Amino acid sequence: MKIHFILHEIFEVPGAYLAWAALSGHDVTMTKVYQNEKLPENADSFDFLIVMGGPQSPIGDNSEFPYFNPKAEIDLIKKAIKADKYIVGVCLGAQLLGEAYGGTTEKSPSCEIGNFPIELTEAGLEDENIKHFGKQAITGHWHSDMPGLPDTAEILAKSKGCPRQIIKYSKKHYGFQCHLEFTKKVAELLINSDKDLEKKSQTLPYVQSPQTIRDYDYNEMNNLLYEFLDNLTKRNNQMQKLKNYKQILNKIKKEKYFLLYVSMNNCSICHADMPKVEKIVNEENFPAYYIEATEIPEAIGQLSLFSVPVVILFYEGREIHRQAKIIDFNELNYRMKQICENK
């Protein structure tokens, strides 16, 4: 998977997000806007967009940040939404994601800096990607704004100082006002960027002292983040079942490329091979679907399904590769990589 980061300041680094990408073997690119690097023109060059935080604001005076162009970033996020890419916005990034969905960034009821508990809402406890957080979890915080909330969005978590900590904008798009990427090194960079932090901690209820922030063990929140990212990317890549021939035709017509796996309920080879196909699909971030042939009799004749299992690759509305009965997974993986390179 190709992951692209947008970074707004030298002291706002990806931390555990970058560590997860490296551990998972993903390809990483970055736009450092504070170095006047150009944003991607479109969403074709990445599968996953992660927009990090910064002291800027979609609603504030950004005159001291001439390199920050919120409109350009929001336009790119909109392109990524339209292209059905994974998107995670963190802090400022969450606010920009909210703006892309039509929300309006607002001031948070309280400034939060340090490590404080968030509480999952009922929707959060039911969300497959974050319910492992449990009812309450400690996360990092460093903000005074919060993301906008369009009608279609769901609040998954809140805190005492901010009612919008995790927002789900769609099944592949999440905004985190809170920070799970903090490590001791990340925290130190942020501490050093705020010379008034000690003073703030003495007067504001949700601001911790520099030493308290330094002393915190961030491993647990990092592990929560890793599991969320695994859940998000792997769950959405699992093969979806198509229930009629019309759905198959719709995929052929509308999707540039995808894999179709044909199985039968009583086929032991099918049941053994399907997890192997799913593994390749997940690794390549490849759209994939499956059918039970006997449940869609029309498909048997229309697709010439004379034996199972069958794997068919479709590209630009036509079948370009098929394997039946004995699946050569190396060949299948090679063909999928070719499609991904030409997409």
Image (cartoon, helix red, strand yellow):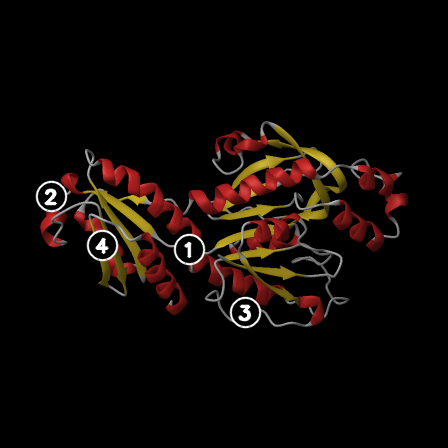
Tell us which disc is closer to us: 4 or 1.
Answer: 4
Q: Earlier in the sequence, mark 2 or mark 3?
A: 3
Marks 2 and 3 sit apart, C-alpha to C-alpha, by: 45 Å
Q: Which residue is mark 2?
A: 297
User: Is residue 104 visible from the viewing direction of this image?
Assistant: no
Is 277 placed left or right of 295 in the picture?
Answer: right
Q: Give the x, y percent position of residue 215.
A: 82, 38
Helix, strand or loop at disc 1? Answer: helix
Q: Quadrant of residue 314?
A: bottom left
Tell us which disc is closer to us: 4 or 2.
Answer: 4
Q: Nearer the viewer, residue 106 or 131?
A: 131
Q: Which residue is mark 4?
A: 323
Q: Earlier in the sequence, mark 4 or mark 2?
A: 2
Q: Residue at x 65, y 58 (%)?
A: 58
Q: Residue at x 14, y 47 (%)?
A: 307
Q: Residue at x 58, y 42 (%)?
A: 226
Tell us which disc is closer to us: 2 or 3.
Answer: 2
**Which amino acid is tagged 1?**
Glu
Q: Give the x, y percent position of residue 343.
A: 38, 67
**Which amino acid is tagged 2?**
Pro
| Label ID, residue 284 | 1
Q: Earlier in the sequence, mark 1 or mark 2?
A: 1
